[in-house]
Amino acid sequence: MLIKQERTGEPVGMIQRAKLNFYDCVLRPNPSRTVVRPFDPHYPRDFAGGTSRAQETVDLIVALDEVELARQLKGVTLSLDENHRDVDTMLLRRFEEVAGGIEGVGRINAKQRRLIGAYFSEEFAYEAAALFNPSVVLHPEQSGLPEGTIRFVMSLRGIGEGHVSSVTFRTGTWASGGALLIDDPSPTSVSPLIDTCGKGEGVAARLCCAGSRTISETVLFPVLPSQRQGIEDTRLVRFCEDDGSIVYHGTYTAFSGGEVRSELLTTTDFRSFEMRVLTGQASSGKGMALFPRRIAGKYAMLGRQDGKNIWLHFSDSLLNWEGGTKLITPNYPWEFVQMGNCGSPIEIDEGWLVMTHGVGTVRNYCIGACLLDKNDPSKLLARTPRPVLAPSPHERDGYVPNVVYSCGALVQDRTMLLPYAIADRFTAFATVSIDNLLSVME
């Protein structure tokens, strides 16, 4: 585990705008973290016809003698056992998924089935290229902690082969004004299983990572056609229902490779998830962020429907979003190109605190903040005229240069914990006093 104390002054790689404190702790991509996902060998269209490539592969496997079959199975098991549990069960499950397209299934024995499952699977390093755009919420379990310390869950966007985005999680503890501890992630990652698909109001899928022993083992990689190229920029929010019950929602962008749409994941334990499609004219926008409770009996959401301004939406339905009003428009040079939110609004005594992003020259992404009226968030009370964080001349290179970005922060005892991404590559952490942040607004 990494225990890091805060440091003050000019941050490495950042330009200080408000009085921020920065931790030395950094989360970087880790190519050793993998999931096993389906692999389907097939011929290009011009060579298709006759026996399928999949069937030809199965026929070769079935023709192996017992000695070679055992040797191949042993090699597969030794390879996968390092990062995965219940390898035999996983391989048999994959065989069952492809069995409907295989001829002569009845003649295939248990060992052959496991090896066929291995040939139709592949390991995917889901955070090999980048680990960024973090969002943070209170952990469901807060017992057994020292006074003044909280436990949190953080979602991150991992990028792997083919620029495919997945959702990965970390946990940790934080004492306001004190130590930040990020728990070491488990070497094991658990792939989500589709429990049901397309049943219930707006349900795209119900996923289960029941084998996860810790939240860090849970990984949500694309399982639906709408997400083929990625699940991007999850904005987690700890949502309080009118009866006081708590549920965790996360708005995210589903990218099929050709189209984008907004979807919503919901969980109470970060092991079982329900994914639902957001509908309505406003749902086509990226970067939607849900308020943590209803306002005047309605759900409220921030978005960037026109690609430039921050919009405010109200709805009687969690899943349907229409219309909306323009709330915040670019006003300062660092946000002239476009604005958006950096996560769900945070309720403080003075109103709704919203971390924002602005895009300026050379497509620089900076982080700012604004304050909305608590009873009527359509009223903008104040905003930061200069960025809170901006790319530094000394550290602007990465997967996407000139970017600092966040998908959600956490406030405790009038101090904000702000995880943020640098250059769409890795994640760092800072804190800022709420009083100081409000003092630099106008």
Image: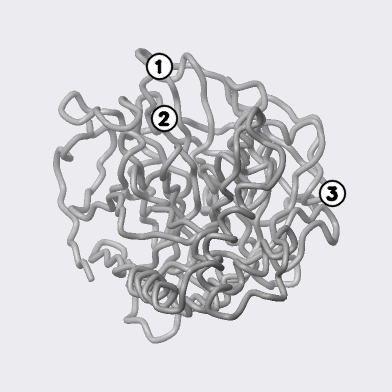
Neighbour tally class for label 3: few under 14, some 14-19, many 20 plus, Cα within 10 Å: few
Q: Give the foreground label among 1 and 2.
A: 1
The residue at which mark 1 appears reads as 360
Judging by the rendered image, the residue that carries numbered circle 2 is: 384
* First-in-chain label (3 vs 2): 3
**Front in this rendered view, residue 319 or 100:** 100
Name the amino acid type tagged 3: Asp
From mark 1 to mark 3, how far is it between C-alphas? 36 Å
From mark 3 to mark 2, how far is it between C-alphas?
Answer: 32 Å
Above/below status of 311 relative to 24:
above
Q: Are marks 1 and 3 in contact (CB under 8 Å)?
A: no
Query: Residue 306 occupies which quadrant of the picture?
Result: top right
Instruction: Please provide percent x and percent y for residue 200.
Output: 85, 61
Residue 376 coordinates in the image, percent (x, y): 69, 41
Label for residue 316?
3
Mark 2 element type? loop
Residue sitting at x 82%, y 52% = 202
Quick one: SS at disc 3? loop
